[in-house]
Image (cartoon, helix red, strand yellow):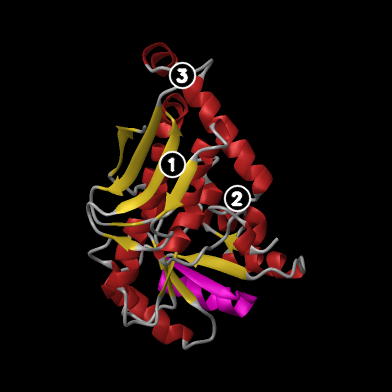
Amino acid sequence: MRESDLIAGLDQQQLDNFVDYVLSEDLGSGDVTSRVSVPASARFSAVLAARQPIVVAGLQLAAAFFRKLNPEVAIEFLVQDGDNVAAGQPLLRIAGSAQLMLAAERSALNTLQHLTGIATVTRSYVEAIAGTDCVLLDTRKTIPGLRAIEKYAAKVGGARNHRMRLDDGILIKDNHIAAAGSIVEAVKAAKAANTGLEVQVEVDGIEQIEPALTAGADRLLCDNMSPAKLKGAVALVGGRVPIEASGGVRLDTIREIASTGVDFVSVGRITQSAPAADIGLDYALSS
């Protein structure tokens, strides 16, 4: 399936399942408050707007919640995912049944705020390493069940997606090495399996690099190394394989890390710890 056919990283079946699950979680047997206090004939128009500077992500997904409860809802998109938006700028306009719009509001906002928060934080990391030749990667540190949409938001923010699932690549880490007996044994076994996948090896010391390369590692992940050690690792590798830096990377440290000559920096916090964006939905009665 083409990427252009997806909505926030989801195909149609995944989108339907996600929207149904989230709405069922929020609605239960129905929005009692709106049903008993708002006339069934009442109609609302509304504007969804940013309340802080943001990078938008998940707008089409948010709209899907309103469409699910009211297929006749009118929606006008005013920006697109990936746009930098100033505080106060409208994102979309909607009009339709007041009861149904109120019922869908929280599910739509929760999703949009979360994904936009990820895209906004990600963009700040990307901008922090602008001008270097280093690429920002996301990780598998995602909320269970939300990986596809969170990685979509990270990509919107400018990161490159890395390993959606465990079958996307081989990454030999310290626990694999301990179980195999050594880096050499772990890498040799992985290469002998002939999976066709790249074999990446995590190293946390300079002394592990040469054994990993000799055994056939295709890529290195330098974990929790200081910038000085990363420079040493880059010099030792000498361009033989790509190098990724990871571990405890913050916005205030990523540029120094990226400037050591590593090819990639992976940051778990862009999906794991991004704060929700402040986005609001303001209603007015329609005639």
Which residues fall within the magenta stretch? 205-222
Mark closest to the chain's N terminus, 2 or 3: 2
Q: Quadrant of residue 106?
A: top left
- Looking at the rendered structure, the kind of residue marked 2 is Leu
Q: Residues within 10 Å of mark 3 (few under 14, many from 20)?
A: few
Left or right: residue 244 versus residue 70 is left
Cα–Cα span, label 2 and label 3: 33 Å
Of residues 141 and 199, the one nearer the viewer is 141
Residue 112 point in image, percent of width and height: 41, 45
Q: Quadrant of residue 176?
A: bottom right
Q: Which residue is mark 3?
A: 40
Any magenta on residue 219? yes
Q: Residue at x 45, y 26 (%)?
A: 103
Quarter that holds the C terminus: top left
- Looking at the rendered structure, the kind of residue marked 3 is Ala
Residue 22 point in image, percent of width and height: 52, 32
Pointers 1 and 2 in contact (CB under 8 A)?
no
Cα–Cα span, label 1 and label 3: 26 Å
Residue 239 point in image, percent of width and height: 49, 87
- Looking at the rendered structure, the kind of residue marked 1 is Thr
Circle 3: element type? loop
Cα–Cα span, label 1 and label 2: 13 Å
Q: Which residue is mark 1?
A: 111
Left or right: residue 109 versus residue 277 is right
Checking the image for residue 10, the label placed there is 2
Q: Residue at x 45, y 21 (%)?
A: 41
Mark closest to the chain's N terminus, 1 or 3: 3
Q: Residue at x 38, y 59 (%)?
A: 247
Mark closest to the chain's N terminus, 1 or 2: 2
Left or right: residue 1 versus residue 18 is right
